[in-house]
Image (spheres, grey):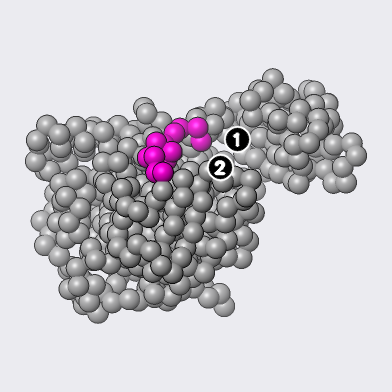
Amino acid sequence: MKININQETMRDKVYACWLGKNIGGTMGTPYEGRKQINDIQGFSSKPGKPLPNDDLDLQLVWLKALSEIGPKQLDAKVLGEYWLSYIGPPWNEYGVCKANMRLGIVPPLSGELFNDEWKHSNGAWIRTEIWACTYPAMPEKAIRFAFEDACVDHGFGEGTYAAIFVAAVQSAAFIINDLDLLIEIGLSKIPEDCRVARSIKLVLDCFQKGFDWKETRERVVEDSADLGWFQAPANVAFVVLGLKYGACDFKKSMITAINCGDDTDCTGATLGATLGIMYGTNVIPEDWQAYIGDEIITISIITGNARFPATCTELTEDVMSILPVTTYQDKWNPDITYGFSKTGNQTAVSAEADLVEDFDPDMFKGRDFVQSLQARSRFSFTESNAYVTALIEFDKAPQISPNSETAIHITLRNRNCVDYKSFLFTWILPEGFTATGQAVSRVNWRGADQHRHDQSSFVITAPDQVDPVNELVLKIASPGRMKPLLVPVVLLG
């Protein structure tokens, strides 16, 4: 498949994404947290400037990380470090993940531990546009970065599945403006039985049966009652509801979504950004654009001496400047070729446009990635060096009491796939701790992804007294290789 996006078309869609994000966040913010159906008709903020919104703020930090570290090195741990350096708010899942990381708990564990109240919430799916814009028409890559982002503060919760869904929809929307097809693609990336999928399918079913939007909204709220308020499944469903019942008309769709209540700045902002990607600036009403202008006003960023984009125009140019790196296609993987030319299609495109050659929407579908996540323990993390990746899995939360035991499983993947490798395990333990288990592992040239029997297991036993934070190190060495992989493991007392 060959995708050739005109540079100005791309720039227009990226700009419309951020502009739509700003408009929706500004319109929805005054109504955030209301549990009843609203009856808004437009803005209630003062004209001239947008309202600040953490939905956009965090993405400015992620773009900084992407620009400074590069896509190949960017993962949840890097984003976690940037979070600790640049993100201020202590509330909800933001506060939980930062408190965990300060104890040495790495992502995804940082979003999983002590986070039952918030891991299904809205903090991650509201910040997916940066991954869609830097990986346009590349939903498989966009969702992988969305996971690395979301797992920091949502672990393996519904908040992470919501981020994967929205990232897939928005990435695909750069070349597809068929809403039903986009929803199909998004649903194909998350578990069929997860709560996000259930809420979205409920909206689609109600719409097909002819229910009005208010009845559909009530059914979504009722179905999510056990999860409580401010949770991802219902709020993502409100975005889909707004798009379906508003027929992708920018004003009607946004007002409908915000009138559903709940996390209204998030629903409005995500809906506005998605329509901006689908149709470009043509979809943005001129009066609404004039009402808020081009400025970005931040509320959540600890700036210090760091530079962050101050306008949607500046943010758009920063995204455009990194696209040659993120969309680079290795010559050994030519299934999809991307190009950004100065000539070609100048308008919003669909799957049938001449922008795409040999396009098959099914190429954008598939659950391989999320199924690989579901195969892991929810108490797990990975560490890598140049030649090996280690998946560290706990049977239960990484906590230990005096004289108790905890099991840790290690699965290795051979990153330098030219030969078999043997690995030697050595534990460096706090005083009094012991580790028993397999001392040697061997991994074939295909790695361990398809061979779970390559897993090695250890039992860690605690002494009579344990500290609040117990720091262990697993040394994984391969004979003939210069540097071992050192894996820090924290067990909370």
Quarter location, residue 430? top right
Earlier in the chain: of badge 1 and badge 2, it is 2
Q: Amino acid at mark 2?
A: Pro
Name the secondary structure under disc 1: strand
Quarter location, residue 226? top left
Disc 1 and disc 2: Cα gap in Å?
Answer: 7 Å
Looking at the image, residue 209 lies above or below residue 17? above
Mark 2 lies on residue: 108
Q: Amino acid at mark 1?
A: Ser
Q: Are marks 1 and 2 in contact (CB under 8 Å)?
A: yes
Looking at the image, residue 146 lies above or below residue 463? below
Foreground of the two, 105 or 275: 275
Q: Residue at x 43, y 75 (%)?
A: 314
Looking at the image, residue 333 lies above or below residue 444? below
Identify the mark at residue 380; answer none if there is no mark. 1
Q: Position of residue 114 (x, y in %)?
A: 50, 40
Q: Which residues are magenta?
A: 358-369
Q: Left of 389 or right of it: where is 127?
A: left
Q: Position of residue 42 (x, y in %)?
A: 15, 65
Quarter location, residue 466? top right
Q: Residue at x 19, y 72 (%)?
A: 286
Residue 36 visible at all: no
Name the secondary structure under disc 2: loop
